[in-house]
Amino acid sequence: MGADKGMDMTRDPTELLSSLNASVRQSFAHEAECNARNENPAGWVFVRLVDQIKAFEDRLNPNEEIGGYLPTGVGADAFHILAVAYSSPDLLIFSGLNQHGRPVHLIQHYTQLSLLLTALPKLKEEEEPRRIGFLLEQNLGQAKK
């Protein structure tokens, strides 16, 4: 009888068992991620959006802050993004200030999300530039507890 080609019988049994356990954990983690995506798609999109915001902010210079365009209409102006949130299972919420310093609050279905990140001059020259990525990530960590 031939040996099972799918299993290396020369490996240490403890190492083999550890490898199999890691594979099973990875499968469960993937299944959990898929379930989370299906049960709370806005939350899943939010997690990915936080990663994108943080990466974009890492490239800004000291007199710039993150802004965005939501290409939902002709001639839409950029706005300073002050906060991003989600409401399970399907809404993303963007809050900020427009070019006139007036508050804006956009509620968007996660399937309609199209956000163009841009660098905008700081709102207040004398203050440190606002960075929201780490705050979003911090809030995300607290929500998972």
Image (tube, rainbow, N blue to C red):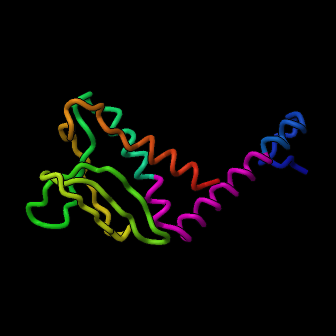
x and y percentages locating residue 136 in the rendered image: 45, 48
Residue placed most toward the observer, 27 or 2: 27
x and y percentages locating residue 92 in the rendered image: 38, 64
Residue placed most toward the observer, 54 or 129: 129
Position of residue 18 in the picture relative to residue 83 (left or right): right
x and y percentages locating residue 5 in the rendered image: 78, 47
Residue at screen point 62% across, 56% down: 30
Residue placed most toward the observer, 60 or 27: 60
Compared with 16, 25 (above or below) is: below
Compared with 133, 62 (above or below) is: above
Compared with 145, 90 (above or below) is: below
The answer to whether any part of residue 5 appears in the image is no
Image quadrant where residue 45 sits = bottom left
Which region shows up in magenta?
A: 20-47
What kind of secondary structure does the magenta stretch mostly adopt? helix
Residue at screen point 33% across, 37% down: 57
Residue at screen point 91% across, 51% down: 1
